[in-house]
């Protein structure tokens, strides 16, 4: 399971970010982490917000990952959102600041168990 990273546009909506991730996962990869990044050339996030998505290869070849869901998490809701998803059969795989429509938000990524 060799990991690799890719960039996802930080001006995307949460639904567009999810679609970009599903596109990569359709090729036999699985998201392991999603986080806000910054332009490495200018060292500023405001110029061109971007997110870094890390993936691992799924084995055996042809394996498809289970359903993925992204959810914005506000501090006051974090425990409830995570608890409700876990109770409903989801696993938390990542929770980091992510750019959504150019603004930094806390986003949790859940995978159906």
Image: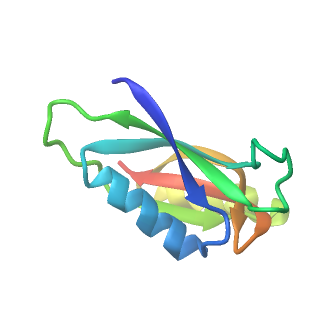
The residue nearer to you, when weighing 41 against 44, is 41
Q: Is residue 86 visible?
A: no
Residue found 45% across the figure and 33% down from its top:
4
Q: Position of residue 45 (x, y in %)?
A: 82, 55
Q: What is the total number of numbered labels drawn onto the structure image? A: 0
Image coordinates of residue 58 in percent, x first then y, are 26, 35
- Colouring style: rainbow
* Residue most extreme to the front: 41
Above or below 90: residue 19: below
Q: Residue at x 70, y 75 (%)?
A: 101
In the displayed structure image, the side of residue 111 where residue 38 appears, left or right: right
- Write down the quadrant of residue 48 in the picture: bottom right
Q: Residue at x 15, y 30 (%)?
A: 60
Q: Is residue 80 left or right of residue 104?
A: left
Please state which of residues 46 and 79 is positioned toward the viewer in this rendering.
46
Q: Is residue 6 above or below residue 89?
A: above
Looking at the picture, how far across and down is residue 29, in whole percent?
Answer: 32, 42
Q: Quadrant of the N terminus?
A: top left
| One can see residue 49 in this view | yes
Where residue 13 sits in the image (x, y, percent)?
A: 61, 76
Task: Say which residue appears at 14% left-offset and 35% top-offset.
Answer: 61
Q: Is residue 94 above or below residue 101?
A: above
């Amino acid at each position: 399971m060799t990991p690799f990273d890719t960039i996802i546009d930080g001006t995307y909506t949460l639904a567009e970010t999810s679609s970009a991730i599903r596109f990569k996962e359709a090729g036999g990869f699985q998201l392991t982490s999603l986080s806000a990044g910054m332009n490495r050339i200018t060292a500023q996030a405001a110029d061109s917000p971007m997110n870094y998505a890390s993936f691992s290869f799924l084995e055996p070849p042809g394996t498809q990952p289970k359903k993925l869901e992204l959810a914005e998490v506000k501090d006051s809701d974090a425990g409830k959102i995570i608890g409700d998803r876990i109770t409903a059969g989801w696993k938390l795989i990542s929770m980091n600041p992510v750019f959504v429509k150019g603004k930094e938000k806390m986003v949790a990524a859940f995978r159906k168990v």
